[in-house]
Image (cartoon, grey):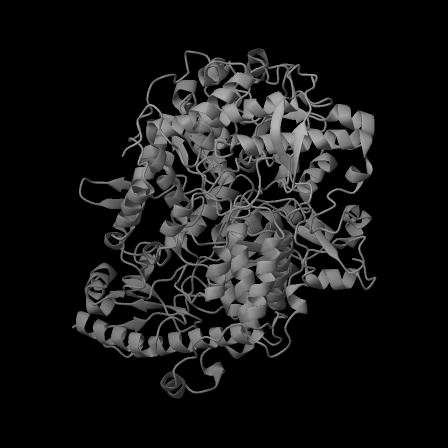
Amino acid sequence: MQNSNKNPVYPYMPNTLPEVRQEMLDRVGIKSVDELFAHIPEEIRFGDKPLPLPERMASEQALSRYITGILKKNKTCDDYISFLGGGVAQHYIPAVCDAMVQKGEFLTTFMGHYCVDSGKYQVWWEFQSLICDLTGMEMMGWPAQEGATSSWSAILTAARVNSGRKEAVVAGNIDPDKLRNIKEVCRAKLDIKVSKIDEKTGLVDMDDYLSLINENTAVVYFENPTFLGGIEDRGEEIAKYAHEKGAYVVVYVDPISLGLLETPKNYGANVVCGELQSLGIRMQYGGGMSGFVATPYEDKWIVEYPFLALSRYKTVEEGEFGYASMNYETVSYNKRENAGDVTSTCSALWSVAVACYLTLLGPDGLREVGETMAYKAAYAKKKLGELDKVDILFDSKSLKEFTVNFDKSGKTVKEINEALMERGIFGGHDLSEGFPQFGQSALYCVTECRTKEEIDYLVESLQEVLK
Amino acid sequence: MKSNYLSEEKGRGGKEFVDPQRIIRDKFQQVRWQEPLVYDIGRPGERGVLLDSAEPEIVDELGEDITNIVPEKMLRKEAPRLPEVGQARVVKHFTRLSEQMSSEDSTICFPLGTCTMKYNPKIHERFVNMPQFTELHPRQDESTVQGVLEIMYKMQEYLKALSGLGAVSLQPACGSQGVFSNARILRAYQEDRGLGLDKKDEIISTVFSHPCNPATPAMSGYKVITLYPDETGYPNIEKFKAAISERTAGMIICCPDDTGIFNPDIAEINRAVHEAGGLTILDSANANGYFGWARAKESGFDMTHWNLHKSFASPHGGAGPGAGPIAVREDLAQYLPVPTVEYDGDKYYLNYDLPKSIGKIRSFYGNIGVVIRSFAWVTSLGKEGMREVTNTAVLNSNYLRTFLEALPGIEVGFDMPQRLHEIRYSLDKIYQDTGFDSDLITQRLNDFGIGGSFTSHHPMIVPNPITPEPTETYSKEEIDEYAAAMKEIVRECYEEPELIEHAPNNCSFPNITEEMANPERQAPCRSVFERVHKGEVK
C-alpha cells in the first residue's frame, strides 16, 4: 500500500515522523517549521510555491529500476574494443583497488581530524610519499581535482616562486582543451606563449620552443609522453636551457610510465605533475580522474605549495607516529584572496586506489606494465603502418599512444570510426578538429588491456573499412 | 554503555535541560592497530598482483631488446622506491587503516559543520559501480553514451528548478571550481561590455563566505573587498553600499552563510550591486538551509553553484571527488564551460557551440559519478521531499540549539535570533574559565565515539567557535547523544580537567606532541622524514 501523502515516510529522514517532529517543535517552542523561515523576506521567500520538480520516486525498487534502466542504454569499453586515450584510458584495475575505494569508511568520511581519523591521515601521507618516490620529488599534498587542474596549478605555483616574471612557455603538442584551460586560468597572472610542433616527430619544434624562453619566462611546461603520443627524449636539453634563462621547468607525466621511463626530476624538472587515472582508477566517463603536483622540499616551494599537505611526526608515545597538516597557514583556507591558488575538496578517494595500485605492483610490476604497453603499442603501430592507406604520422617512439593518419584513404576519421563501431571497435580519438594541420588523423591508445588478438582484429577491420 | 539520565537544570539560555534516557558511550575505544607504514611491510620480491605480459609473438616480432621500442636514454636508471608487499597483507594494511577513522557510515559526523555531513544512500553506490558507467571513456561516440547524457541533462533541469536560473554546467569538480567558473564568467561578461579589469576590478565578499569566494576571483585578477559583520552577525546594507562603486565588478557571497544566517537584506544588496553594473554570485554550499524556501533567482542572484557532495547526499570520499555545478542567468549561458548537455527531442548531445565560453575548468564533463548519485537523490525526494530536507535540517539545528544554549559557557555567536541549518557557537567563556579552547574541548567528543569537529573557517571572528550542522538524516536520538556528550564535557572542563587536557584519550592517535608546531620537524614524505630524523634537518 502507498503511504498517504499527508504523512509521507522518508527513509533517510527519521525526524519527519509526526510524533518526533511534534516533540522537537515543542522543545523549540514553535508550532510549525514555517516559523523558522519567517525571517526570509516575503518578497523573496519561495513560500508555499511548489518547486518545479517531479513527484518523488519513493520506492527504492522503483528508483533502482529507473536509474539502472537509463544507465543500461550505454555501450562501454567492455562491450567494444577500445583504442581511445588522450588523457584517460581503460587500464586494468586490480580487484583490491575497487574493494578499497568502495569501503564505506573511505567513501563516506571527509577531511577528518588527525585525532580520530588517523587511519585516513596515514593513507594520505603514504599517498604523498608514494608519489614522491615515484617521481623523485619531496613535497606533495593531497591530490588535485584532475590532471588539467594539476597543470595550471603547477604552472601558477612555479610562477609564484619565480616571482616577477610574467610569461610561461607551453609546448604546443598538448590537448587543445587543456591549453585553452591553462590560458584562461592563468591569463590574469601570466602571458602564455605556445610553441610550434615538429611535424616529423610530433614533439615540440625545439628551435621555436627555445626561442620563446627568455628573461621574462617564469615557467617552461611540457608533457611526457606527449598528448600526440611521442616520448620526449630531449628533456635535459630543454631544462638546461630554461634554467640558464632563470625559468623553472614543469613536466606533466603519465605516472604509469614511471616504472619504465625516467622521472622528469632526473632530466631537470623542478615540478612534476600529472593525471593519476592510469593507476587504478576507473574511467567513469571522465569522472575518474585525479591530479598531483610534486615540488622540491625547499622553503620557497613549501610556502607556495597550492594544496593542503600532511606531515608525519613523532609523538609522545615511543615508536608511534601521528599525522597533521603542515601548510594550513599558507593555503587559501587561511590566506583566502592572498593565496594565489585555491585548495578545496579534491579527489581524495582516488588516492586510496592509487596507493593500493602502487603498493600492489611495486617497482617491478610498474616496470612490467610499462613494458607491456610499450610492446603492444609498438606492435599495433607497426601493423597499422603496414596498411596501404594508413600512415603513422610521427617517427617518435611511444609508450601507449601514437597518431595515425588516414589522408590517403580519402575517408574522414569520423567515417572510419563509425565503420569500426559496426565491427565492435572504438577507434582512436579524432584529432582533425583539435589539430587540423594533421589532416584526418586519430590518436590510438593501446594499453595493457588490449590483447594481440584484439590488435590484429583492429588491423583486419581497418583493412576492410579502408578498402 | 551507561544510560546517563541528565538532571533537570536551567542553563543560560533559560531552556530546561530535560532529557530522558540519553546514552553516552563512555566505554568507547577506537581501534589502535599500530599499523606500520606501507613501506615497512613486505620484503623485496614480494608482489601484490601480476598482470599480463606482452604476448610472446609480439616480443618475437619486435625483439627482446626494449630499446628497440623506447629511447634508451629515457629508460629509468634507478627503480622507484615503492613497497613490495603480498596481496593479503596489502588488504590488511588498508583495511586496518580504514578502521581508524570516523565516517558517515559509522559515526555521528555532524560536528563537522559547514560540510553538510549526511547519510549517503547505499542504492546510489550500485548505480555508480555498474560497468555501464565505470567503463565509459569520455571520448566515446555520443550514440554510445545516451544513458549517462540523459542523466546529466535531467540533472541540469533539476538544478535549473532549484535555482530558477536558466542554464547549467555540471563540469566543475568541486565547490571552489564552481565559484572559480562563475568568477570567470563574471569577468568574461564584464570584458564583453568593455569593462575589463582596467575599469572594474573589485569583487565584494563577506568574511563568513567560504575561502574560495575571495581566493578564486583574486586568481582572475580582481581585488577583493571583504565585509565584516555587525553585532547582528551580518554586514548591514549600508556597509555594502559603502563598498559598491563603479569599480565593482560583482559580489560573491554565501547566503545563508556558515553562521546559519540568511541576510534579510539580500535582495536589496543584489539590486545595489546591479545598479553599479556588477553581477552577483551566490555560493550555495549551504543549500541545505534553503531548499524550497529560497532560490538564487528570487533573491536576485545572477549565478550560483552547489556542492553536490554536501547538500545532495553524494559521499565526501575523504575530500572528493565532489561536484560543483553552476547555474547562471539565461543570457549568461553563452559563457558557460563547454560542453553543455543538450537534447534535440530525439537524442542527447554535447554542445560545444558556445563561442563566448570561458573554455574548460576541468577535463571533459565533470565528476559524473557524483552527478548520478545526486540525480538519484533528487529523484527519490521530488519537490516535496527537497523542501522536507531543509525543513528537517533547520529544525534539527534549532532543536540542538535548545540544549547547547542551556549549557553554561556556550553562546550563540551574534545577535541575529533566527538561524537556519547550522549555528556558530562560541565556547569562549569556558576557555576564559578553564584554558581549554574549542579544539581541545571538541577532541574530547571523540572519546565518546563522536566524529571530528569543524570549528570555523579562518579568520576566526567568533572566539573559540564550534559549528555543528545536524543535517536532516540525523535522528533525534543522535542529536540528543551529541548534546548529552557536550554537557558531560563542559562539566569535565571544570571538574575533571585531566580528562580534557590530553583528549582524546581513547582514540587511535597517540596524542599531540610539541613536534607538530615545529616546522623543522616536518616531513611530507618518507625521504624527508628519514632525513629529518637522522638529524639532517633541512
Question: Which residue: 40% across, 30% down?
Answer: B192
Location of the C terminus of chain A by quadrant is bottom left
Q: How many marks?
A: 0
**Is residue B266 depicted above or below B180 in this figure?**
above
Name the residue furthest left.
Answer: A467
Question: Which residue: 80% across, 29% down?
Answer: B494
* In this rendering, position of residue A449 left or right of residue A217: left
* In this rendering, position of residue A114 left or right of residue A249: right
Query: Can residue B95 be seen by looking at this rendering?
Result: yes
Q: Nearer the viewer, residue B110 or B415?
A: B110
Residue B450 locus on image (x, y percent): 63, 40
* In this rendering, position of residue B477 left or right of residue B307: right
Question: Which residue: 73% across, 35% down?
Answer: B441
Question: Which residue: 33% across, 23% down?
Answer: A6
Residue B312 locus on image (x, y percent): 43, 37
Location of the N terminus of chain A by quadrant is top left
Q: Nearer the viewer, residue A215 or A387?
A: A387
**Is residue B343 depicted above or below B391 in this figure?**
below
Q: Nearer the viewer, residue B515 or B194?
A: B515
Residue A252 locus on image (x, y percent): 52, 59
Query: Can residue A276 be seen by looking at this rendering?
Result: no
**Is residue A311 depicted above or below B230 in this figure?**
below
| Quarter assignment of residue A445 | bottom left
Residue A285 locus on image (x, y percent): 37, 53
